[in-house]
């Protein structure tokens, strides 16, 4: 039985706890302002949980997630746990496990580029860049058969396999087209069908799904070409429909385009409203404990949670408008600080600025 108002909050490792603290400040504000009564319940995950309980996803954390309406996730992993066998490492044993366990097959990573934040020249982005990466999340290379092997000379090898079933491609393609309908009505499907058999299936299946969406245009691009186009001329693109691994890589590239990985939120969704929300940026070990990490991707992930899992559109949009305003005012954490005309702030101060901006907007 799901508890109506509970959300599981799993800060995890690295900068996770610091940026999560700022997201919780923002949650506090919307809770009070809109009388939402959302109850954030914290639990351990990742390396932190390995140290405390010997496993990256303790039973009590999984139970909390099961009882909750959604999960707000920080980040997991770190060199300390890199020596563990791959299935025990924080990434696979907690994050990938949760994605698979809750059948969260769709990962949405929206990326809007503000001109002065992008490393690209003004003329390359002046037409505006507003992308939505729709990444397949529970199949492909991440979850195919894998293992170690030896060849006939006794040389050590290892393999991962890339599989897709029609059903997996259909459901993610359906979602991408449905989302495109509310946007610029354009889907670019990413594959490597010139080399990989699984990607031929991907392309054919996307093509067949597109027949149901006559009002949405579809083009297919090889992943290497897409990567180049994002650098040269990103404006014409709208929804990027990606297999798991390519989506992982291209979404980081989108983050780069927008100025920093610290800006990229994500929503992982399944067939119902339950979802896992996390910044795409990782643990950023070099920034830990220095009040330097950018909390905006974590805060933005909270707004996606409010929108998709809790249907609190007003609160979600208030948070997003506040983030935009703060950035437009030139308030920047170190990752985005490029000129002396801007105001350099730390993690905590950035959280405070977002809350102040929300107060002004209410
Ligand atoms: C992401 C991350 C994860 C992934 C890691 C931490 C397992 O890079 O969410 O993009 O590869 O999916
Ligand atoms: Mn990634």
Image: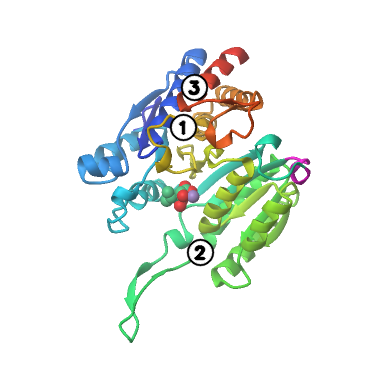
Q: Which residue is drawn at 73% across and 43% down?
A: 184
Q: Crowdedness of circle 3 by 10 Å Cα count: few (<14), some, many (20+)?
A: some
Depicted 147 relative to depicted 269: above or below: below
Q: Which of 335 and 283 is in front in this view?
A: 335
Q: Is 83 within the magenta?
A: no
Residue 284: x, y in percent? 43, 42
Q: Where is residue 103 in the image (x, y as percent from the top left)?
A: 43, 48
Q: Which residue is at a point 54% across and 54% down the rendered structure image?
A: 249
- C-alpha distance separating marks 1 and 3: 10 Å
For residue 207, what is the image quadrant? bottom right
Q: Residue 174 versus residue 291: which sits nearer the camera? A: 291
Report helix, strand or loop for mark 2.
loop
CA gap between label 1 and label 2 equals: 40 Å
Residue 126 magenta-highlighted: yes
Q: Is mark 3 on a helix, strand or loop?
A: helix
**Which label number is shown at residue 164?**
2
Q: In this view, does 304 lie to the left or right of 177?
A: left
Q: Is residue 100 above or below residue 325?
A: below
Q: In which quarter of the image is the N terminus?
A: top left
Label 3, on which residue? 349
Please state which of the two labelled residues, at mark 2 or mark 3, is closer to the viewer. 3
Reading the chain from its start, which is encountered first: label 1 or label 3? 1
Identify residue for label 1. Answer: 292
Could you give the CA–CA distance between mark 2 and mark 3, rounded to whole angstroms? 45 Å
Circle 1 packing at 10 Å, graded few (<14), some (14-19), many (20+), is many
Q: Residue at x 63, y 62 (%)?
A: 224
Q: Is mark 1 within 8 Å of ligand 1?
A: no
- The image shows a total of numbered marks equal to 3
Residue stretch in magenta: 123-128
Q: In which quarter of the image is residue 12?
A: top left
């Amino acid at each position: 039985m799901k508890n109506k108002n509970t959300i599981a909050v799993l800060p995890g490792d690295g900068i996770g706890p610091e940026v999560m603290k700022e997201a919780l400040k923002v949650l506090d504000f919307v809770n009070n302002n809109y009388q939402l009564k959302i109850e954030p319940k914290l639990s351990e995950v990742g390396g932190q949980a390995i140290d405390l309980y010997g496993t990256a996803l303790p039973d009590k954390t999984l139970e909390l997630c099961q009882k909750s309406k959604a999960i707000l996730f920080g980040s997991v992993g770190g060199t300390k746990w890199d020596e563990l066998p791959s299935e025990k490492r924080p990434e696979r044993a907690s994050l990938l496990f949760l994605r698979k366990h809750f059948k969260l097959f769709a990962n949405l990573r929206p990326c809007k580029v503000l001109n002065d934040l992008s490393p690209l020249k003004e003329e390359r982005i002046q037409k505006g860049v507003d992308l939505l990466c729709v990444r397949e999340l529970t199949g492909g290379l991440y979850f195919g058969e894998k293992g170690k092997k030896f060849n006939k000379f006794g040389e050590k090898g290892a393999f991962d396999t890339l599989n897709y079933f029609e059903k997996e491609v259909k459901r993610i393609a359906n979602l991408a087209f449905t989302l495109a309908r509310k946007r610029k009505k354009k889907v670019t499907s990413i594959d490597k069908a010139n080399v990989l058999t699984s990607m031929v299936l991907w392309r054919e299946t996307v093509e067949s799904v597109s027949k149901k969406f006559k009002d949405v245009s579809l083009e297919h691009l090889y992943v290497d070409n897409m990567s180049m186009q994002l650098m040269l001329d990103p404006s014409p693109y709208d929804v990027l429909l990606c297999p798991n691994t390519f989506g992982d890589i291209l979404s980081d590239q989108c983050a780069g385009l927008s100025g920093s990985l610290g800006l990229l939120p994500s929503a992982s969704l399944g067939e119902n409203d339950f979802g896992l929300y996390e910044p795409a940026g990782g643990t950023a070990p070099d920034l830990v404990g220095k009040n330097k990490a950018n909390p905006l991707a974590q805060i933005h992930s909270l707004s996606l949670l409010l929108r998709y899992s809790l249907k609190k559109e007003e609160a979600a949009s208030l948070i997003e408008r506040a983030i935009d305003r703060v950035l437009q005012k030139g308030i920047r954490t170190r990752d985005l600080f490029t000129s002396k005309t801007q105001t350099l702030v730390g993690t905590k101060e950035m959280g405070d600025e977002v809350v102040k901006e929300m107060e002004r907007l209410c």
